[in-house]
Image (cartoon, rainbow, N blue to C red):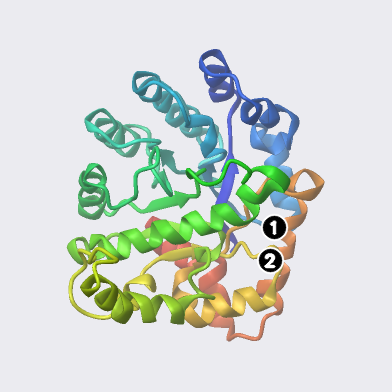
Amino acid sequence: MIIDAYAHVFPDPLVDALLAVRPSAELAGLRQQSPHLRDADRRLAYMDRHGFDVQVLVLARPPVWLGMERSEVHRLTRVANDSIAQFCKGHPDRFIGVGVLPVVDEVMMTELERLRSELGLRGVLIFSNIEGLPLDDPSMWPLYQRCAEVGLPIWIHPQHAPLHSWIRRDLLDRMIAWPFDTTVAMARLVLGGVFDRHPTLRVVTHHMGGMVPYYAKRIEAFADDMVEEYSRLGMADRSRRGPGPAIDHFRRFYNDSVSNGSASALRCALDFFGPEHICFGTDFPFGPDHGERWPVDELNVIRAIDIPQAERELILHGNAERLLGLDTA
């Protein structure tokens, strides 16, 4: 069994609805990129060729939501979740849908209940920053409380952050700034005390936990020692997290396996997060050959790396089954 826990989708009804409100290069580009984003039959044919049994479908391209009026965000979020649910409906044994909340407010909390109970979506996607706000902003706490109560996992996708004006040249935004913003989002959840208050909350990151595995010792040193010194010097704010080593909370995240085919990166992530917190995930259908190359690269690395077969099975399907509450039989 192989479950791709982080595959992308962008159905045509949503593209049309967004184009009618706020045309952009991001939206126009979707029509030029892989047809797998909107064509379920082509996607299934690709999955069958390579032995991918199930895909967890997560909406792509968070920048398309930037700059909209809040009322339009509310309306289009319903279109997004309806279109994802419809995409999955014809093949419920192959596609599992994750809803999206581009912002969090009272209207979107009502939408959370709808996507979960009425549409049957099995998780919810948020972005690494919400219109520039960090993920431990007070506006986000009702979402974490409700997801913890009902056992709904949260997927995080990186979003453009207010960085340098030149960050988009040479794709630096996606190449480096996105994994960085994921890392910052993870740190805000940990240092903002989200896991202390909601210990059962499950959060799935993109791109294998951003920069956290590589910088784990630096994070540990600063979060547990240097923050105290810099706070004493008036150069930093104390975090709101509870007692105990902060680095232990970083290991609570679930993470996809998107490494662009790097065995050493996967090894680093496994050493930090452990095999119980890595899920096979591919970023499909982005990348070369209409997005068909990267998933195979990721699968080949997982198959080749020297780990016990039981751990390999956790990565390929077991962890996703546990996250999503799937019937493993």
Between residues 220 and 164, which one lies in front from this camera angle? 164
The CA distance from mark 2 to mark 1 is 6 Å
Answer left or right for 184 relative to 288.
Answer: left
Q: Is residue 326 visible?
A: no
Are the residues flagged by discs 2 and 1 in contact, CB closer than 8 Å?
A: yes
Name above or below for residue 244 compared with residue 196.
below
- The residue wearing badge 1 is 295
Question: Can you give x and y, in whole percent of width and height, for residue 294 in the image?
Answer: 72, 57
Residue found at the far front of this picture: 233
Name above or below for residue 39 compared with residue 179.
above
Q: Give the image quarter of residue 28.
A: top right
Q: Secondary structure at mark 2?
A: helix
Q: Secondary structure at mark 1?
A: helix
- The residue wearing badge 2 is 299
Between residues 267 and 225, which one lies in front from this camera angle? 225
Q: Which amino acid is tagged 1? A: Pro
Residue found at the far right of this picture: 289
Q: Which amino acid is tagged 2? A: Leu
Tell me which residue sits at (56%, 58%) in the image.
3
Tell me which residue sits at (59%, 19%) in the image.
23
Residue 264's label in the rendered image is none
Question: Can you give x and y, in whole percent of width and height, for residue 133 in the image?
Answer: 34, 44
Residue found at the far top of this picture: 20
Question: Can you give x and y, in whole percent of width and height, for residue 81 in the image?
Answer: 43, 31
Question: Can you give x and y, in whole percent of width and height, for residue 243 in the image?
Answer: 18, 77
